[in-house]
Amino acid sequence: MTGREASPLSGGARLRRRRAASAGAELLSLLAAFVAVAVLVVVVVSIFLKGAGALSVHLFTRTPVPFGETGGGIEQALIGTAELVALATSIALPAGVLVAVYAHEFAPAGVARLVRLCLNVLAGVPTIVVGILVFTLMVKGSGQSGWAGALALSIIMVPLVARGSEEVLAVVPATLREASLALGATRARTVLRVVLPTAVGGIVTATILAVARVAGETAPLLFTSSIAATTVNTDPQRPLASVALSIFADSESPDPHAHQEAWAAAFVLLVFVLAISIGARLVASRARGGRLR
């Protein structure tokens, strides 16, 4: 058999091998996605089952009860967590977006690379180190407070918001910038009135990821806002309770009911993260005229 006659057969064999490899890769991808979803489902269901006995209205409307009693709740922790996250977001969101805008729109290439390197390093710093830093700067000598806890969480959020926002700014079409500049707008006005409104959906998504990252943080709060609180407090000048710290404290308690309450609080924390994610995405969708991306 000549080489010319064998070539169609060898070409067909290569095509079959490519199709088999493609099908195998698709199957592996599908399997990996299934495993990821299955792990999430197992985690959520197991937490729910272990904390179902403590899930009631009292969990959201009551504060902790003395050791050995039942019917307590985590009202003060829910309010404290919401306030800590809100304060941290109010600090980290403008700071992260400004860093992203500078690095992508205004900074020279060398400076932009240095900024990105610093953000990556900051994102990799253990959160307990951030807590120790804020403890040294704000807590030592003056006491723990909600502001100290919020600052620690905001430091964790800034690199996440900045890097996520910069990735979104990078996909804004250059033609939009060029059209704005051609019409006589300054570079700063172009960024403010054209680039940022176009990228707002991605910035919201980056902020959501950052909020989800810090909502369950415990280590930084141990040094900044960990004083046990059994009553509702909304004054950031004093330590604020948090769901994560309540879970930690209940898990260390010898009371079996406290253990069940810790599982219930963990489930509530998962639902909290899911709710703010969906809510923020709906807000971003409405801002784009009903198109969810």
Image: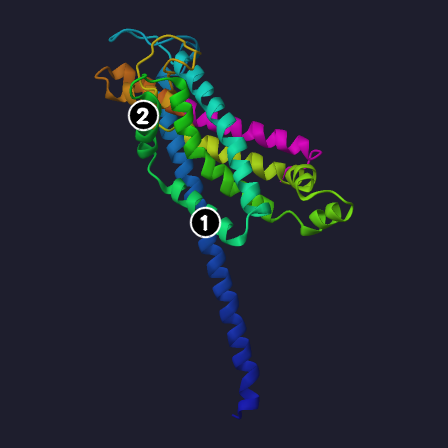
**Which of the two residues, 13 or 44, is positioned nearer the viewer here?**
44
Q: Residues within 10 Å of mark 1 (few under 14, many from 20)?
A: few
Of residues 99 and 87, the one nearer the viewer is 99
The residue identified by callout 2 is 135
Going from N to C along the chain, the mark reached first, 1 or 2, is: 1
Residue that lies at the very extreme toward the bottom in this rendered image: 2
Task: Report the span colored magenta.
Answer: 268-293
Instruction: Identify residue type, mark 2.
Output: Phe
Tell me the SS state at disc 2: helix
* Magenta segment main secondary structure: helix
Question: Seen from this angle, which residue lies furthest left?
Answer: 254
> Horizontal placement of 55 versus 163: left or right?
left
The structure residue drawn at horizontal position 30% and vertical position 23%, both measured from the top left corner, is 248
Query: SS class of the residue under badge 1?
Result: helix
Any mark on residue 114, and which? 1
Quarter where residue 78 is shown = top left
